[in-house]
């Protein structure tokens, strides 16, 4: 078996969140605060180590958790904050700017985002800027998906315009079939990459087993359908993408597959909430 | 180098395909595997292409040669003049196994250059991937991504065959999204299916 050099696509979230990829817009679906803190602290630590400015926009509880994880990774968060390389902001500032009367205030949100970004972008010490935030998730929980998606559009345009590496987190039950009727697909379409789970290998095993249980092997017309499927404009592991295909192709069986997947997930990790 | 050259794939139902195409196909039995690869290589030899067939279970190099001979191909003569190479993957990877993925790609591009310099119309290759285990899967998929990009526009035709035994739904999608197309035989004729591509 030849050893293979690095190529396209991502096989773990660490691989995706390590190097800066200007203009990219990554989304994480998380089912525990521990996973959120783990992924965001990794993203931030990698950026700090590479001489980039790091902006973190979250709830107080999440920012506290991320800070602890960063310190666990050996980062002197106080020194980084004092030097201006690490900036924490309360998500409520952006959520308040984004929402008014249940509708997105785009100009207000753009102004708030731009002001937060201006300081670090003007600082020549930093090679690049990476930004984690959960504004859209907060907005989604309070005002619904349409407002959240509009907020994502603001972030996406800003990432492309300024060459940012943008990372979002959504609290989401990926085994809830209702999510696949709209919100999950919509979230995917607003991002360049999707992180569906903490452990990709385990996610693959769970999904494969669930599909096997319900459908048996993929042969004949199912195989042809999968080979002809146009996919999504969002890089993600096949074990997640195939759930979108299944939702499109076999909606009658989809719920049973997700139910089996959830059972395997819980069996492996009884503490899991999703 | 251009891929505007068309060639006969050799499979009933598909008239011609452009060089540079990186295809995949799935099989369950030796018969299903032979049903695609034997006519594929018979057509390649008819079209004056240099053919490299890397075999793996359930079809050994010896059986592959025998099945190709049953179609009327003078296998011995083709091997002797260098137009046909049929080797078991153990044998082939004994030489190539220590190479990185991009080095394997370079090896194929070198074979293409050699084939064209010797007057062949192109290079036609296949690899049966049944030897790829779970531990090597991700690395092998990276290799497939490299091939998908590197062979575009080259005078190379590639058909990668994957057993369905032991492969989950996610692995099947891994494969189809890293190839230009999937060829399949739903009934009597073959079809080309194009779907999601990472590129």
Image (cartoon, coloured by chain):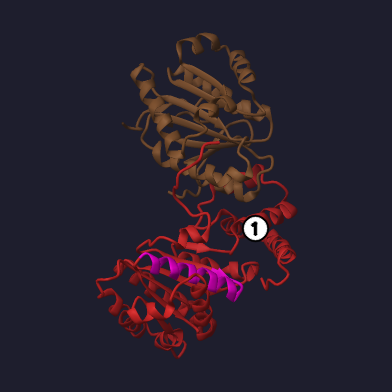
Q: Is residue B185 above or below residue A78?
A: above
Q: Position of residue A65 (x, y in %)?
A: 54, 79
The foreground one among B175 and B114 is B114
Looking at the rendering, in which quadrant would you find the N terminus of chain A?
Answer: top right
Mostly what secondary structure, the magenta segment? Answer: helix
Of the chain colours in the picture, the one used for chain A is: red
Q: Residue furthest bottom?
A: A101
What chain does mark 1 sit on?
A
Q: Measuring 68% from the left and 58% from the top, which residue is drawn there?
A: A206
What is chain B's hue in the picture?
brown
Residue in view at x 45 percent, y 91 percent: A101
Q: Quadrant of residue A51?
A: bottom left
Res. A183 in view: no
Q: Which residue is mark 1?
A: A202
Which span of residues is magenta-colored?
A29-50
Q: x%, y% of residue A237?
A: 55, 56
Q: Secondary structure at mark 1?
A: helix
Give the number of marks: 1
Image position, residue A79 (x, y; %): 38, 79
Q: Position of residue A98 (x, y in %)?
A: 41, 84
């Amino acid at each position: 078996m030849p050893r293979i050099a690095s190529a396209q696509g991502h096989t773990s979230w660490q691989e995706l969140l390590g190097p800066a990829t200007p203009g990219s817009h990554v989304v994480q679906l998380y089912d525990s605060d521990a996973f959120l803190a783990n992924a965001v602290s990794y993203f931030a630590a990698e950026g700090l180590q590479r001489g980039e400015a790091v902006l973190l926009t979250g709830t107080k509880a999440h920012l506290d958790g991320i800070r602890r994880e960063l310190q666990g990774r050996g980062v002197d968060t106080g020194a980084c904050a004092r030097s201006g390389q690490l900036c924490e902001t309360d998500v409520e500032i952006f959520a308040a700017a984004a929402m008014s009367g249940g509708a997105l205030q785009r100009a207000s949100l753009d102004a708030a985002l731009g002001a937060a970004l201006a300081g670090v972008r003007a600082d020549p010490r930093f090679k690049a800027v990476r930004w984690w935030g959960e504004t859209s998730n907060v907005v989604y929980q309070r005002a619904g998906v349409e407002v959240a998606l509009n907020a994502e559009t603001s972030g996406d345009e800003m990432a492309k315009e300024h060459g940012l590496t943008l990372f979002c987190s959504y609290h989401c039950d990926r085994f809830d079939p209702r999510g696949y009727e709209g919100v999950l697909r919509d979230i995917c379409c607003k991002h360049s990459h999707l992180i569906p789970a903490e452990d990709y290998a385990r996610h693959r095993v769970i999904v494969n087993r669930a599909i096997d249980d319900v459908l048996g092997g993929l042969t004949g017309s199912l195989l042809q359908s999968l080979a002809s499927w146009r996919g999504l404009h969002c890089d993600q592991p096949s074990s997640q993408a195939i759930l979108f295909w299944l939702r499109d192709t076999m909606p009658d069986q989809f719920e049973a597959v997700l139910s089996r997947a959830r059972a395997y997930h819980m069996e492996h990790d009884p503490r899991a909430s999703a | 180098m251009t891929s505007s050259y068309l060639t006969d794939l050799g499979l009933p139902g598909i008239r011609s395909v452009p060089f540079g195409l990186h295809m995949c196909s799935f099989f369950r039995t030796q018969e299903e595997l032979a049903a695609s690869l034997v006519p594929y290589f018979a057509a390649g030899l008819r079209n004056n292409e240099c053919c490299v067939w890397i075999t793996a279970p359930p079809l050994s190099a010896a059986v592959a040669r025998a099945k190709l001979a049953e179609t009327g191909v003078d296998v011995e003569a083709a091997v002797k003049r260098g137009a046909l190479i049929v080797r078991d993957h153990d044998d082939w990877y004994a030489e190539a196994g220590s190479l990185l993925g991009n080095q394997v790609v370079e090896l194929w591009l070198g074979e293409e250059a050699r084939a064209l310099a010797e007057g062949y119309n192109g290079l036609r290759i296949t690899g049966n991937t049944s030897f790829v285990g779970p531990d090597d899967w991700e690395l092998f998929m990276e290799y497939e991504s490299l091939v998908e990009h590197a062979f575009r526009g080259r005078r190379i035709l590639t058909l990668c065959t994957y057993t369905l035994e032991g492969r989950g739904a996610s692995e099947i999608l891994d494969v189809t999204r890293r190839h230009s197309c999937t060829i399949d035989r739903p009934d009597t004729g073959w079809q080309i299916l194009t779907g999601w591509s990472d590129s």
